[in-house]
Amino acid sequence: MNDFRYILIAAVQVFGSKHRTCHFHNPIKQKIVMTSREQYDRLIAAYIKAHGEGNENAIGRLFTENALLLGPGHLPVQGRQAIQDIYKKEHMGDGVKLTITVKEFQDSGEMLYGAGTFEAVEGTGNFLDIIHRQADNSYLYHVIIWNDH
């Protein structure tokens, strides 16, 4: 049974499914296959958690080294450290509630695209995420564009 699972995982990787192998702590040492959408949803959940906790270091770990933020009323913010600094200064607070609803999702292999709406204490708006697949098949935010209503 175990051998069949690894053969199936290898076949999926070779033939290019929208499923990717995602490695995370797994005490029984099995490879777990998650769809790219599931990985995107986990990335969003980690973002919401870090945002609510006011944890700019955790936010920074969710972005590529040269990521870009494009938001209303701001100059573009580029680079992981600059993103951490802006989140520390402007975007987060104790227990800030953030709700993200993905309306559209696309997987183009190396990149994922997500678009939708968000709701926060400060207001509501729309967003577009561009997510890059990393060498270990994990995904990180590369560009986030948003506007306020």
Image (tube, rainbow, N blue to C red):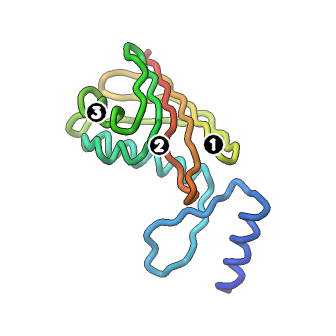
- Under mark 3, the amino acid is Asp
Vertical comparison of 82 with 22: above or below: above
Query: Do labels 2 and 3 touch, CB within 8 Å?
Result: no
Mark identifier at residue 81: none
Indicate the position of residue 96 as horizontal and vertical percent values: 27, 35
Residue on which disc 2 sits: 64
Label 3 environment density (alpha carbons within 10 Å; few <14, some 14–19, many ≥20): some
Q: Residue at x 48, y 51 (%)?
A: 42
Residue on which disc 3 sits: 85
Q: Along the polypeptide, which appears first: circle 1 or circle 2?
A: 2
What is the C-alpha distance between the residues marked 3 and 1?
25 Å
Between 73 and 147, the residue placed more toward the observer is 73
Q: Residue at x 23, y 39 (%)?
A: 95
Label 2 environment density (alpha carbons within 10 Å; few <14, some 14–19, many ≥20): some
Vertical comparison of 34 with 11: above or below: above
Q: Is residue 103 left or right of residue 25?
A: right
Query: Do labels 3 and 1 touch, CB within 8 Å?
Result: no
Q: Residue at x 47, y 48 (%)?
A: 43
Between 132 and 102, the residue placed more toward the observer is 132
Secondary structure under tag 3 reads helix
Between 76 and 96, the residue placed more toward the observer is 76
Indicate the position of residue 125 as horizontal and vertical percent values: 45, 22
Q: Along the polypeptide, which appears first: circle 3 or circle 1?
A: 3
- Under mark 2, the amino acid is Thr
Q: Is residue 148 left or right of residue 88?
A: right
Q: Residue at x 46, y 23 (%)?
A: 70
- Under mark 1, the amino acid is Met
Mark identifier at residue 111: 1
